[in-house]
Amino acid sequence: MKVDVLILGGGLAGLSAAHHLGLRGARSRLVVEAKDTVGGTAGSVTTRGFTFDYTGHLLHLHDPYGKSLILDLLKENVASHERKAWIYSQGAYTRYPFQANTKGLPPETVAECLAGFLETVHRPRALPSDPDFLSWCRATFGDGITRRFMRPYNEKLWRTPLQKLTTEWQGRFVPKPSPSEVIYGALADQNKLFGYNASFRYPVKGGIQALPDALAERLEPGVVRFESPVIAVDLREKVAEVKGLGQVHYERLVNTLPLNVFLDLATPLPADVKAARKNLRWNTVWNLNVGIDRTAPADKHWIYYPEKKYPFYRVGYSSNFSPHLAPEGHAALYLEAARPGGVRVDRDKLELAMIKGLRDAGLLRRSDEISAKIWMPVPVGYVVYDRARTPAVNAIFRHLNSLGVESIGRYGGWKYSFMEETILDGKRCAERLTGGELAAETGSTAELRALK
Ligand SMILES: Cc1cc2nc3c(=O)[nH]c(=O)nc-3n(C[C@H](O)[C@H](O)[C@H](O)COP(=O)(O)OP(=O)(O)OC[C@H]3O[C@@H](n4cnc5c(N)ncnc54)[C@H](O)[C@@H]3O)c2cc1C
């Protein structure tokens, strides 16, 4: 088999690359997907009348083109929501983000958080140009907020000591309230929406799977080959070994598989790239989805759990994103725990701890019946931004660039990003491959430039 462009993976990045290549007249393109559905991490599974995503998958639309494409794909099958997000700690619910909403916590905690924050205003700490995340939290929010939320929550999520994390990833994702907002939120219920995900859109029917399905419908039949995992790639000979298809020769290769997985399939790799591969770190998101025979509380979309006594870092009510995700009178919940990537996990033990955690947190009552339960782990969930990540990614992309290989999406690009950006990654990749306006800049050079 021979194609101009071979795309590895039929998640949003691969589908978007194929779609935009088609729009630009490139006909000879093939997407090989390991599973029997498109969507990858932005997919959904339906069981016992519940539809579950890989945890919460909400649409944050910031780019005019991304927004218009996504809304056009979903047409009337989309609704807007204002975020209802909470933190549960010390037995109290406080609004997200923690740093702007401490009212409701024990008075000594409020005082500790407020005093620490005011210290940062009156006696700002000097930070180096590339501080570690822990020092940055202390300098930005103070010791109290760091001790009560930033540190325990982020350690549960990243599974990495925060001194080892950089701050490259946090700009868009960690809201920074003003002093008056922090003070007001310590005294009163500040119902103000902070941050990049203050409002979101979500499909009315079909879960987030509706989005990749709609994108795949824009492709001609046969462009996506299902149950066709790539098992090896010879980068020098430009040929991929694909289960069920045999050898596929290509002119250009677009990878959307997690970078670690792709490099483990690819040969030959020079020594510096092999060494860089060893420096890639990630976490696995252990997502347990649960359906219960009671409706969800109307005032909550999701809740953060910074305390160690709860095994999950976040629990969400997906049936509050759309009632179609659960049978009438039922609620769909997603529970998220994280472990370092590649570490073996005793799933039965974790499941018992997760269900106990739900009971301890008061989300599951003795009288509730669990109507559905399904594990949907994300093996490469979050890329860990430690000190080794950027030099490693630079070395890997330099090499892939030299071979004309594109590596895009959240995982191919080895970054912290979201669905709209992933779709835009595919568009930009198609433009580069077809000599569009961004022709001079490959994905890898864009990444290198952004990191400078
Ligand atoms: C826990 C979590 C929560 C998230 N929440 C949100 C959110 O609320 N909003 C948001 O916008 N974004 C969210 N995201 C990000 C979003 O999931 C990603 O941006 C997007 O889905 C990435 O798509 P992708 O195509 O880059 O990768 P993937 O979806 O991982 O696609 C890769 C594809 O490659 C396939 N594949 C793997 N191995 C092979 C092989 N050997 N051969 C062939 N195919 C293979 C996979 O099956 C998959 O289909 C979240 C991510 C996670 C992990």
Image (cartoon, grey):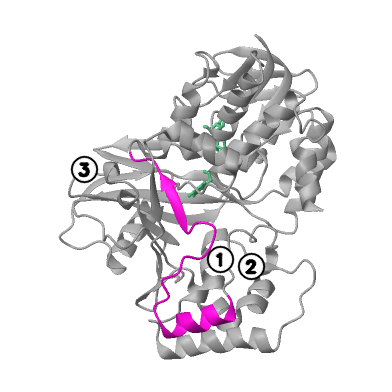
Q: Position of residue 285 (x, y in %)?
A: 49, 50
Please tell me which of labels 2 and 3 falls first in the chain: 2
Q: Does mark 1 have its CB less than 8 Å from ligand 1?
A: no
Q: Which residue is mark 3?
A: 327
Q: For the point 35% across and 53% down, which residue is it?
A: 351
Amino acid at dot 3:
Pro
Mark nearer the viewer, 3 or 1: 3
Residue in the picture at 56% in, 28% down: 15
Q: Is residue 248 left or right of residue 86?
A: right
Q: Quadrant of the N terminus?
A: top right
Residue 228, placed above or below residue 100: above
Picture quarter containing residue 266?
A: top right
Mark pair 1, 2: CA separation: 7 Å
Q: CA distance from mark 3 to mark 1?
A: 35 Å
Ligand 1's quadrant is: top right
330 displayed left or right of 110: left
Q: Which mark is residue 155?
A: 1
Quick check: marks 2 and 3 in contact, CB under 8 Å? no
- Give the magenta part as a residue range: 178-204
Give amino acid for label 1. Glu
Residue where numbered disc 2 is placed: 162
> Which of label 2 and label 3 is nearer to you?
3
In the rendered view, tell whether residue 110 sits above or below residue 172: below
Is 102 inside the magenta-drawn segment? Answer: no
Type of amino acid under label 2: Leu
